[in-house]
Amino acid sequence: MTPSTIDYQHYLSESSKARKPSAIRRLIPLTKIPGMISLGAGAPNGDLFPFEGISISLKNGQSLQIDSQVLNESLTYGPSDGIPQLNGWLKELQRIQHAPPVDFVVSIGTGSQDLVTKALQMLISPGDNVLFESPGYVGVIAFLRHQPCNLIDVDLDSHGVVPSKLREQLDNWPADKRKPKMLYTVPVGGNPTGVSQTLERKKEIYEIARKHNLLILEDDPYYYLQFGEKVPSYLSMDTDGRVLRFDSMSKILSSGLRVGWATGPAELVNVMNLVTQTANLQPSSVAQAITYTLVDSWGHDGFYAHTLKVAAFYKQRCQLFCSFARKHLEGLAEWVEPDAGMFVWFYLKGITDSFDLIMTKAMDKKVLLVPGIEFYCHPKEVGPVQSVRASFSNVSDENMDAGLERLGSLLREHIAETVDTK
């Protein structure tokens, strides 16, 4: 099914509208035509590459060999949207997991953040207003601070973006100011808050996006880290073709592989590919070949079974972490126990500024957390923040217990000092 009529040119920056395919990169597909003699592309001669084969040893004792044709193709220049074997596998995965109601394409990137930043670069024109969760993902905040746009805070609660407040913002948008054309959101296991949007909220937010002609940038690296039944994605309800979705293998297979993928309407994803052509030509084909060899050996059912094991592991870690939090921080902090992801967002009582506490006294106690102020688009306007982000993903049982005990001890000492000085 094709999407309803959307003028995608409305969303593109002027520089994106002017982009043209690389004169050399557009020849790559033509080299696959039988009988075609290519004198155009400056690809190095593969006979000189020293690699004969690559085998992969898995922790279960299984050994996999990368197919020779896949390997040979991955060792040289390849398509900007990823090797066709993995691209096709991921496109089928999206059909199985999300069943998008309209036509879509997939593009592979060097991790999902690579694709998120390229999408933003593609869309942002000087003076644009971008709707952004507050608090939100610091990696994208850092990128946007160097773009010619204004970041517009979108309020969150224990279930993510608050539809009523988003609607109020847009319904009452000043007539003399440029209206936002996109909303960036991490809807599952939010970083830093750990909160997830409910299906009802997603439906409501999607209708707000339709009313106000917004694109939704659905950055969803923790989708497969949901601890219970998966909440349907924005992509699954996108009857208009206004969702650009971003997925990642970092939390599922390996963060060092740097394999992510974007899903959305061809009119947008193809422009992102043009950005790739001028930025880094293509994502690593060898990393893609390794990924494809593994997931192809599993099949889509085997891949999904693996993600369930990953989610079960993080669920257990989260439950244990929160039990230690109740043990050491009861009465000293407030938090919402996550139902997905890797993070807990602590609101610390009895303090006014978590930055100074964490960066000085917590360091002395030898416990590391991230001060909450780092996750706000406008730290000077927000002022002192009492929250901190903690992660339970890669900490031993003993260190969870000890780390939260140290945090609790620090808070008690700080509160006692505050009382003494009054």
Image (spheres, rainbow, N blue to C red):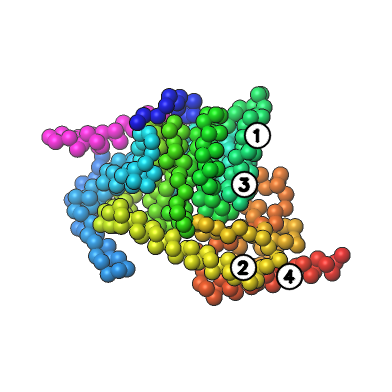
| Upstream in sequence: badge 1 or badge 3 | 3
The quarter of the displayed image where residue 165 is located: top right
Label 2 to label 4, Cα distance in Å?
14 Å
- Residue 19 at x, y = what percent? 41, 29
Q: Which residue is mark 4?
A: 412
**Identity of the residue drawn at 75% across and 57% down:** 352
Does the magenta-highlighted stretch encompass residue 30? yes
Label 1 to label 2, Cα distance in Å?
36 Å
Label 2 to label 3, Cα distance in Å?
22 Å
- Say the numbered circle drawn on residue 156: 3
User: Horizontally, is 164 left or right of 240 in the view?
Assistant: right
Quadrant of image for the N terminus? top left
Q: Which residue is mark 1?
A: 168
Cβ–Cβ under 8 Å for marks 3 and 4: no
Secondary element at image label 1: helix
**Identity of the residue drawn at 58% across and 60% down:** 337
Q: Which residue is mark 2?
A: 325
